[in-house]
Amino acid sequence: MRRFIWFGFFLCLSWSVLSSEHIDKLRHIDSVRLSDHQMAKAKLASIPMASLDTDEVFYYRYLLGLILTVDNDLTDIIARYDSLLEEPVQPELRLRILGSLINLLGVKRDWKSGLQRVEELLALLQEVPDSTYKPDAYLNLALFHLNIGQPETALHFAEKAFSSEALVPRIRCGLHLVIISTKSKLQLDDLSLAEFSQADQVCNNANQNYTIVNINIWKAKWLLQQNRLDEAQTVLTTTLMKAEKFPTDGQLIEIFSLFAIVYWKNEAFDNARHYADKVMEVEFKEDFPQPLIDTYDIKRQLAERNGDYKQAYQYLTARQQLEQNMYERQLADEIAIQQARFDIDAKQSEIELLDKQNELLKAESMLINERLENSLLALALVSILLSSLLFWSYRSRKVQSKLKMFAQTDALTQIANRGHFTDCLTEKLSQAQKNGSLVGLILLDLDHFKNINDTYGHQVGDWALIQTAKAIKESVGDDAIVGRLGGEEFGAVITGKQEAEIMHIAERCRMAIEHIQSSMSEYQFKLTVSAGVSNSSQAGYKLENLYAAADLALYQSKHYGRNRVYEYSSTMVG
């Protein structure tokens, strides 16, 4: 079967920055490579690279990577894109290459490289704000964040793409799928049948059959949740007809599994067994654990109904093992993503610290030169020499003290920055491990902070961040370490307290932030925060595990309504 994943949404757009006798051929290949893959591959091979100018060669190499993505090893395609990005590629094409590369890194679960390229793409979007390829870039950013389990961020980038004027039908179709899948995962109440119908119409107009199948799979799931079984069965029937024209393992196993569930609920047990068996016939079914888990549950119930309890137990055991494997993989991904973010932030902090150290070296160099000049004058004026030495010694200490403060302090809130906060947490964990004491970590993230910035402006947003930092510092006590970890996210390290006391402190922080009076900013709005708590007795003394556990608890707080505190437990699933 053909392998198609999220990169099936790559854009087919005109290439306005190139012009020659070959450019029309390259544009045509770009426009048909998804609808007629083999023809596009043959036409590209027929163009001699020796006849192309430099920009056309870059475009040719990018198109070759896109076409080979369907049939070749993704590691090779990623290497091709990395190589292209080392060349002096024009910004417009660089946007597309970065978007495609980020998409593939997400599929390969190379979180660190993916997050690094995300930062690079966001910076490039600032440099070329008027690019017609912004929607393409935002779509790939949305898909990547969907892959790393951040549906709210994916929704944010999808909405940014929708606001663009240069939105072609193919990208609009892909964005509808992102919106629907994101809202389904977040279980948002505003998802309706009308939204599915609109997405289906847009994708039909864009001739995107692969995406239509995915949208209808989500539609069938939504109808199943509403217990509208006959409608779900009708959707699945038409969807299967489309999917069989362009079969992929992921789509077929989802459709067969949903058929089995619908027929079981309708008590059509023979049909339920038929489609459950079809799931087991899919070649790479282990790559899609959730529909396989659902199928094992149907097969277990069918076996119990027939009185074959031994077989039912085997299906139950297989299902439980799959659930355990899926949970362990999710946890491993959470830790890997947190570690990747930590490494990137640490690298950025290191760069900033080096810049400040360079400033200090320059200041010290100036000080040395001035001391030498003063020492020449000392032959005649000893008193002036002594005064100068005392002055510059004092100035040097002031410069060093100020640079140290800059390196450790967040400029806006005047609390620890992420780098210094992480260093302090690492030191506390090392000390606590030696004496067997408890270390607690509280992660706090302001709810809907983007709405405050968008509605009232960044000046009011900065005021809210400053007040939040003050509220947290006043709530945790003098012995705690408080830091701003980035954006609207804060952290607090608690030592010398029991688990219940740490949760009490986190709740105290939440209430203090909820009671901040926004009228001081001349606007009326509500500030709330979601918090996640972990401690070393649960997650151990390893920094990344403690972070990942607190972040997972924070995700639960966001997921279950915000403005609340969750404590990490080993049974928690992200």
Image (cartoon, rainbow, N blue to C red):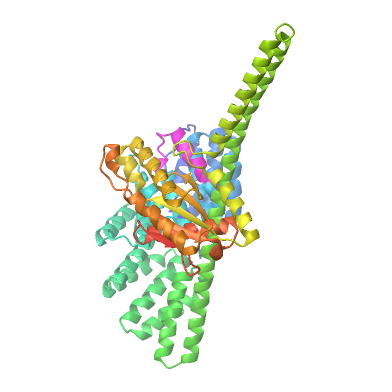
Instruction: Name the one closer to the observer, 248 or 559.
Output: 559
Residue that appears at 26% across and 62% down: 193
Outermost residue to the right: 379
Rendered position, 292 above or below 102: below
Q: Can residue 173 be seen in this view?
A: no
Residue 131 drawn in magenta: yes
314 or 516, nearer to the observer: 516
Looking at this rendering, what residue extends furthest in the bottom direction?
307
Residue occupying the point 26% across, 37% down: 522
Please give left or right for residue 129 compared with residue 322 in the image: left
Question: x, y (%) of residue 83?
Answer: 61, 42
Disc count in the image? 0
What residue do we see at 47% from left, 36% from top?
Answer: 411
| 285 w.r.t. 435: above or below | below
**Residue 224 visible here:** yes
Q: Residue furthest front?
A: 383
Q: Could you tell whether 81 is left or right of 155 in the image? A: right
Instruction: State the extent of the magenta-drawn residues as a range.
Output: 116-136
Apparent side of residue 384 relative to residue 90 in the rendered image (left or right): right
Where residue 285 appears, x then y in whole percent?
50, 71
Q: Position of residue 380 (x, y in %)?
A: 72, 6
For residue 525, above or below residue 305:
above
Q: Nearer the viewer, residue 528 or 391?
A: 391
The rendered magenta stretch, by its main secondary structure, is classed as helix
Q: Where is residue 95 in the image (x, y as percent from the top left)?
A: 48, 40
Find out whether residue 171 is within the magenta segment.
no
Query: Based on the displayed image, in which of its 4 quarters is residue 358 positioned?
Result: top right
